[in-house]
Image (cartoon, grey):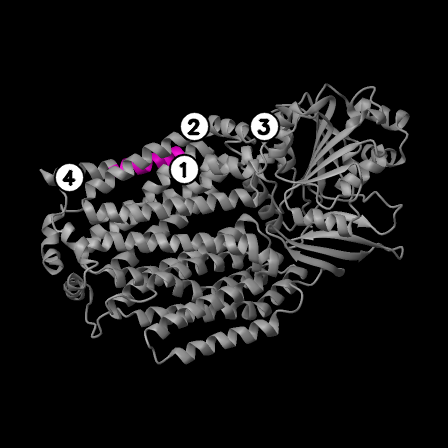
C-alpha cells in the first residue's frame, strides 16, 4: 500500500498559520457549496461543544427511560421503543446536520442548534407531566390504546432535542475538516470526543444524579449545562444573539424552581408513604387498608403492576396468602424431615424482607438467612418501612447468581423470587444455574422458584413459563413439584436434592409439623394448591439459549389479546 | 498545497464500489450493537446483569469505539485505500468469531481470580470485557471515519459525507440492537448469533478485498 504523498504537507499545514490559510482556501473551495460566509479559521470551543453534545444525547436517553419507568416499567418493549426512537432521531439529525453544515458552515449556527436543543430538553419535564397524567388514568382504567398512545406522545417530545443534538457531529466534522486529506482525522477525532462525552452522559445521570436528585432535576441540569456552553460559544464568536440564549437559561431555571416539588407518581389504591428513584428502580412504599382497621405496607416498583413485598402493621399477622408464604413449606417433600433440620436459607430477590420474616417466625431465630437483593436502596427501604431487622438475616446487595457461586455454604432452602417485572433475569432460569443451586443444597435441600401463570377469561391458566422452568429444573433435580398459590396467579416450582414424594409432604404436614404457620400454609397447599409432580425433563433454558423474555412476552401478548382477567 | 491535493485526490484513490462501502458501514454499525447485546448475555451467568455490569459494558464499548474512531481516522488519512479498510474489518471478524469459544473458560478464570476480592463483580467483568471485546470493537470503530475519508474524496463535502455515513451506521445499530435481542438470541442462542455476525463481517470484507484487488490490476 502506497503512502499518500501529499500527507506530510497537510499534516504540517495544520499548525502553521500560513499553511492554514492555504488549506482554508482549498477547503472553502471544496467544502463550501454556495455559501457566502466562510468559516472562521479555528472555531473556538468547537471540541467542547462536541463533547457536551455527546454527553447530552445519552443523558437525554437515560432520563427518558427513567421518566417513563414509573408509568410504563422497564420491560424490553419499552426499552426497544426508547432506543429505537432515539436512534431514528439521531440518524435524522446526522443527515440534517451534514446538509446544514454544507449550507451554513459557520460555528454560530452550530451553537444556535445546541442552544435550542438545550431549551427543548429543559421543557420536556414540564411538557410530559400532562401526558403522564393521561397515561396514569389510562393505566387505572385499563385502556391500552391511550396508554400506548401516551408512550408514543412522550417519545415524540424527545425528537426536538435529540435531532438537534444529532446535527452536532457532522457539523463539527465539516468545520474541522480543512481539506480532503485530513477528513479522516477530523471525523475520527470528533466522533471519538462525542463518544467520550456519551460515556459521561451515561454514567453521571445513571450512577450519580438520578439516584441523588431525581430524573426531572437531572434533565434540568443537563439542559442548563448545554445552554451555558452554547451561550459561551456564541459569546466567544461575539454573536449579537447572546442575550436571547441567556434568556433561555433564565426560562429553564425558572421552570426548574417552580416544578421541582411534588411526587413523581401518585400511589394506586392507597397512600404514598415513601418514594425514591434508585439507580435501578422507581420505588414506592404504599400504605393500604387491610379491612380490620389496620394497614399493610406494600413495596411497589416501577410501573407498579406487582407488589414485591408486604408488611402488616398488625405484628401477629405474618401470612400474606401470596407466593411468599410457600417458601417455608417446601422442605417437607423430604421423608423424615423435622423443622429443626432447617438451619440455613438463601433468598435470591430479598425485596423488603417478607419471606425472611416468615422463615424466621416459622423456624425460629436459629435459621440463618442470607438475603440477596440487587438494589441496595430496596434493602434500605426494607429496614426502614418493613421492619426487616431480624438479627439472623444477613441482607446483601449483590447479584444473586454471583453471590451463590462465590458462597461456600450449603443451604436447606434456596428461594428465587428475583422478578424485574415482568421478567425474571434470564441467568436465574437456566440449567447451569439450577446445577449451581443444587451444588449448594444440603442433602434434604430444596430449590423454590416463584413463577407467574396468568388466567384468561374463562378460567384457563397459562402455564408456559411455569412449565419451561419446571422442565429445565427436572434436568437437574430428581423430583420437581408444582404448587398453585390459592388466590394468586402464581405457581411455585420446587426441586428437591434427593428423591422425595407428595405422600411425604402430606404426611409431614398433617402428622409431624408443629409450627402453626407451616401447618396453615401446608394445609392450604394440600387443599387448594393442586400439588403435582412434573416429570418432563427438557433443558428449555440454558446459558446460551434462554428465551425467557420471549416466553413472557408471548404470555403477556396472548393475555392482552385473549381478554385476560 | 491542499488545494492541489484535492484536485489530485480522486485519481490517487482506487476506484471504489460505493454501494459496497455503504453496505459495509451499515453491517459494521449493526455488528457493534449485536456484539454488545450478546456480550451482556455471555457475562450474565458469571457476573449478573446488575447496573454495574451494564455500566461497564456500555462504558467500555464506548471507550473501545472512541479509540477506534480516533485510530481509524488517522489510518485513513495515511492509507486512504478501501483495501486497508476491508483488511481491518476482516481482522475484526476473526476476533469476533473467537469470542464464543474463549468467553466461558476466560470468565471462569477471571471470575475465580477475583472471587474473594472486594468489588469482584466490578473488576471481574471489567477484565473479561477488556480481554474479549476490546480488539473487535476498536477495529469496528475504525470503519466510520475511514469511510468518511474515502467518501469525501469522491463527493468533496465533509459535512454531508460525515452526516450520511453516521446516519447509515446508526441505522445499522438499530437493526443490530433489535434483530439479536428479539429474534436471534431467543431462537438460536448467543454463541450462534455471534458467529452469524462474524461471518457477515468476514464475507463483506472479503468481497471488498477481492474487488479492490481486481481494480488494482
Which mark, by number, is residue B133? 1
Decide whether residue A263 is among the magenta residues.
no
Residue pictured at 60% horizontal, 34% vertical: A402
* Disc nearest the viewer among 3 and 2: 2
Q: Do discs 1 and 2 belong to a common subunit?
A: yes
Left or right, B206 with reference to A429: left
In what element is the residue under mark 2?
A: helix
Span of residues in magenta: B194-205
Q: CA distance from mark 3 to mark 1?
A: 26 Å
Could you tell whether A160 is left or right of A397 in the image?
left
Q: Which residue is under mark 3?
A: A431
Is disc 3 in the same subunit as disc 1? no
Please identify, in this view, whether the residue under mark 4 or under mark 2 is nearer the observer: 4
Seen in the picture, residue A104 relative to A324 is either above or below; the reply is below
Which element carries disc 1, helix, strand or loop?
helix
Which label's residue is closer to the chain start, 3 or 4? 4
For mark 3, does the 10 Å Cα neighbourhood hold few (<14), some (14 to 19), or many (20 or more) residues? many
Which label belongs to residue B102?
Answer: 2
- Badge 4 marks a residue whose secondary structure is loop
Q: Residue at x 85, y 52 (%)?
A: A313
Tag in front: 3 or 4: 4
Q: Which residue is mark 4?
A: A1
Q: Quadrant of the N terminus of chain B?
A: bottom left
Quadrant location of the C terminus of chain B in the rendered image: top left
Q: Residues within 10 Å of mark 2 (few under 14, many from 20)?
A: few
Examine the structure image and report whether residue B203 is included in the region drawn in magenta: yes
Amino acid at each position: 500500500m502506497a503512502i499518500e504523498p501529499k500527507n506530510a504537507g497537510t499534516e504540517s499545514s495544520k499548525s502553521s498559520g500560513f499553511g492554514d490559510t492555504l488549506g482554508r482556501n482549498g477547503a472553502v473551495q471544496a467544502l463550501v457549496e454556495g455559501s457566502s460566509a466562510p468559516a472562521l479559521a479555528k472555531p473556538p470551543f468547537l471540541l467542547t461543544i462536541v463533547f457536551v453534545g455527546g454527553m447530552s444525547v445519552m443523558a437525554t436517553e437515560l432520563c427518558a427511560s427513567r421518566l417513563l419507568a414509573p408509568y410504563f416499567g422497564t420491560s424490553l418493549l419499552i426499552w426497544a421503543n426508547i432506543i429505537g426512537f432515539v436512534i431514528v432521531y439521531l440518524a435524522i439529525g446526522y443527515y440534517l446536520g451534514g446538509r446544514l453544515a454544507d449550507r451554513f458552515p459557520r460555528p454560530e449556527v452550530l451553537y444556535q442548534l445546541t442552544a435550542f436543543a438545550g431549551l427543548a430538553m429543559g421543557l420536556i419535564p414540564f411538557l410530559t407531566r400532562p401526558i403522564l397524567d393521561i397515561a396514569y388514568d389510562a393505566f387505572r382504567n385499563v385502556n391500552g390504546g391511550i396508554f400506548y398512545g401516551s408512550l408514543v406522545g412522550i417519545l415524540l417530545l424527545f425528537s426536538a432535542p435529540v435531532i438537534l443534538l444529532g446535527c452536532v457531529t457532522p457539523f463539527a466534522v465539516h468545520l474541522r475538516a480543512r481539506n480532503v486529506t485530513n477528513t479522516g482525522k477530523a471525523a475520527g477525532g470528533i466522533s471519538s470526543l462525542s463518544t467520550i462525552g456519551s460515556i459521561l452522559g451515561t454514567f453521571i445521570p445513571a450512577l450519580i444524579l438520578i439516584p441523588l436528585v431525581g430524573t426531572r432535576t437531572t434533565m434540568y441540569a443537563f439542559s442548563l449545562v448545554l445552554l451555558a456552553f452554547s451561550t459561551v460559544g456564541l459569546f466567544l464568536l461575539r454573536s449579537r444573539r447572546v442575550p436571547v440564549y441567556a434568556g433561555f437559561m433564565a426560562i429553564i431555571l425558572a421552570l426548574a424552581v417552580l416544578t421541582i416539588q411534588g411526587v413523581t407518581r401518585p400511589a394506586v389504591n392507597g397512600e404514598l408513604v415513601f418514594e425514591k428513584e434508585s439507580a435501578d428502580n422507581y420505588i414506592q412504599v404504599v400504605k393500604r387498608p387491610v379491612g380490620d382497621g389496620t394497614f399493610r405496607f406494600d413495596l411497589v416498583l416501577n410501573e407498579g403492576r406487582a407488589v414485591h413485598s408486604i408488611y402488616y402493621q398488625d405484628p401477629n399477622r405474618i401470612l400474606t396468602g401470596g407466593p411468599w408464604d410457600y417458601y417455608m413449606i417446601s422442605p417437607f417433600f423430604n421423608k423424615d424431615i423435622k423443622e429443626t433440620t432447617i438451619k440455613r436459607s438463601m433468598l435470591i430477590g430479598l425485596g423488603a424482607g417478607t419471606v425472611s420474616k416468615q422463615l424466621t417466625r416459622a423456624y425460629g431465630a436459629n435459621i440463618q438467612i442470607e438475603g440477596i437483593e440487587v438494589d441496595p436502596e430496596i434493602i434500605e427501604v426494607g429496614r426502614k418501612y418493613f421492619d426487616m431487622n431480624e438479627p439472623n438475616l444477613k441482607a446483601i446487595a449483590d447479584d444473586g447468581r454471583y453471590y451463590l457461586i462465590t458462597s461456600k455454604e450449603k443451604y436447606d432452602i434456596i428461594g428465587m423470587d428475583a422478578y424485574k417485572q415482568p421478567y425474571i433475569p434470564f441467568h436465574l432460569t437456566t440449567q447451569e444455574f439450577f446445577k449451581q443451586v443444587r451444588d449448594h443444597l444440603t442433602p434434604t435441600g430444596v430449590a423454590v422458584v416463584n413463577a407467574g401463570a396468568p388466567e384468561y377469561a374463562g378460567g384457563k391458566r397459562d402455564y408456559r413459563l411455569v412449565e419451561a422452568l419446571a422442565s429445565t429444573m427436572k434436568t437437574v433435580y430428581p423430583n420437581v413439584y408444582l404448587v398453585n398459590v390459592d388466590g394468586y396467579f402464581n405457581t411455585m416450582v420446587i426441586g428437591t436434592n434427593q428423591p422425595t414424594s407428595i405422600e411425604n409432604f402430606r404426611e409431614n404436614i398433617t402428622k409431624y409439623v408443629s409450627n402453626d404457620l407451616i401447618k396453615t400454609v401446608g394445609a392450604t397447599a394440600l387443599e387448594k394448591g393442586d400439588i403435582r409432580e412434573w416429570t418432563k425433563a427438557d433443558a428449555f433454558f440454558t446459558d446460551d439459549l434462554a428465551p425467557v423474555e420471549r416466553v413472557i412476552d408471548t404470555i403477556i401478548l396472548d393475555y392482552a389479546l385473549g381478554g385476560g382477567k | 498545497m491542499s488545494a492541489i491535493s484535492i484536485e489530485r485526490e480522486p485519481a490517487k484513490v482506487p476506484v471504489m464500489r460505493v454501494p459496497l462501502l455503504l453496505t459495509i458501514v451499515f453491517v459494521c454499525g449493526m455488528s457493534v450493537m449485536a456484539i454488545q447485546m450478546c456480550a451482556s448475555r455471555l457475562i450474565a451467568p458469571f457476573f449478573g446483569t446488575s447496573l454495574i455490569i451494564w455500566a461497564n459494558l456500555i462504558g467500555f464499548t464506548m471507550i473501545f469505539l472512541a479509540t477506534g474512531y480516533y485510530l481509524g481516522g488517522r489510518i485513513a488519512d495515511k492509507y486512504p485505500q478501501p483495501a486497508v479498510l476491508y483488511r481491518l474489518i476482516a481482522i475484526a471478524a476473526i476476533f469476533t468469531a473467537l469470542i464464543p469459544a474463549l468467553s466461558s473458560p476466560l470468565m471462569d478464570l477471571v471470575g475465580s481470580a477475583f472471587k474473594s476480592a472486594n468489588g469482584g463483580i466490578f473488576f471481574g467483568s471489567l477484565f473479561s470485557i477488556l480481554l474479549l471485546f476490546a480488539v473487535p470493537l476498536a477495529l469496528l470503530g475504525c470503519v466510520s471515519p475511514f469511510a468518511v475519508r474515502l467518501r469525501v474524496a469522491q463527493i468533496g463535502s465533509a459535512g454531508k459525507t460525515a452526516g450520511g455515513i453516521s446516519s447509515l451506521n446508526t441505522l445499522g445499530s438499530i437493526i443490530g440492537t433489535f434483530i439479536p435481542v428479539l429474534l436471534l438470541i431467543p431462537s438460536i442462542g448467543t454463541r450462534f448469533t455471534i458467529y452469524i455476525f462474524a461471518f457477515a463481517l468476514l464475507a463483506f470484507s472479503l468481497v471488498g478485498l477481492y474487488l479492490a484487488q481486481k481494480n488494482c490490476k
